[in-house]
Structure formats: structure tokens, C-alpha cells
Image (tube, rainbow, N blue to C red):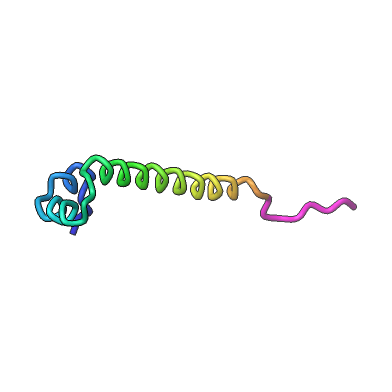
Amino acid sequence: MQDMTISEILRDPLIRQVLHADGTSLTSFARLLKTAARERRARQMDENAGDDAMQFLPTTSLSTH
């Protein structure tokens, strides 16, 4: 099963019914989803940046004789 896009989530009739029952506006829910997606992307980029930095660490120790 593939994850739904934000656009698909916002158009889904069942999700709209739940939002209505909870008293949550579509606008505020869309804002929440977009903020969460943005924060997730930023966190993934930070984690990937750390992985890239590991490539430049020396794998052997340098000794001075």
C-alpha cells in the first residue's frame, strides 16, 4: 500500500467527516500536515548530512614516529 499525498488526504471524504466531527477546519489540518512534512524533511536532511560527514573521517590512525 502506498502512502497518501497531502492532497489526497485533504480530498478524502472519510477524513473530511472525521475533521468535521472533531471540529477541525480543513485549513488548520492542511497547515498541520504541511508543517509536519516540512519538519520531517528537515530532520531527514540533518540525518543524511551526518552520514555524509562520516565519509570524510579517517579510517586509520595517523602516528608520528
Q: Position of residue 64 (x, y in %)?
A: 87, 51
> Observer-nearest residue: 32 or 20?
20
Q: Residue furthest bottom?
A: 1
The magenta segment: 58-65
In percent of the image, x 35 and y 45: which residue is there?
37
Q: Position of residue 40 (x, y in %)?
A: 40, 48
Q: Position of residue 41 (x, y in %)?
A: 40, 44
Magenta-colored segment: predominant secondary structure:
loop
Please identify the quarter of the rendering in which residue 26 is found. top left
Q: Quadrant of the N terminus?
A: bottom left
Q: How many numbered circles does the render carry? A: 0
> Observer-nearest residue: 59 or 18?
18
> Observer-nearest residue: 55 or 51?
51
63 vs 60, left or right, is right
Q: Residue furthest front?
A: 23
Q: Residue furthest left?
A: 13
In percent of the image, x 11 and y 55: which residue is there?
14
In the image, is residue 40 part of the stretch drawn in magenta? no
10 vs 51, left or right, is left
In percent of the image, x 20 and y 55: which residue is there?
2
43 vs 58, left or right, is left
Please identify the quarter of the rendering in which residue 11 is found. top left
Q: Position of residue 34 (x, y in %)?
A: 32, 42
In percent of the image, x 67 and y 54: which residue is there?
59
Vertical arrangement, residue 14 with respect to residue 26, above or below: below
17 vs 31, left or right, is left
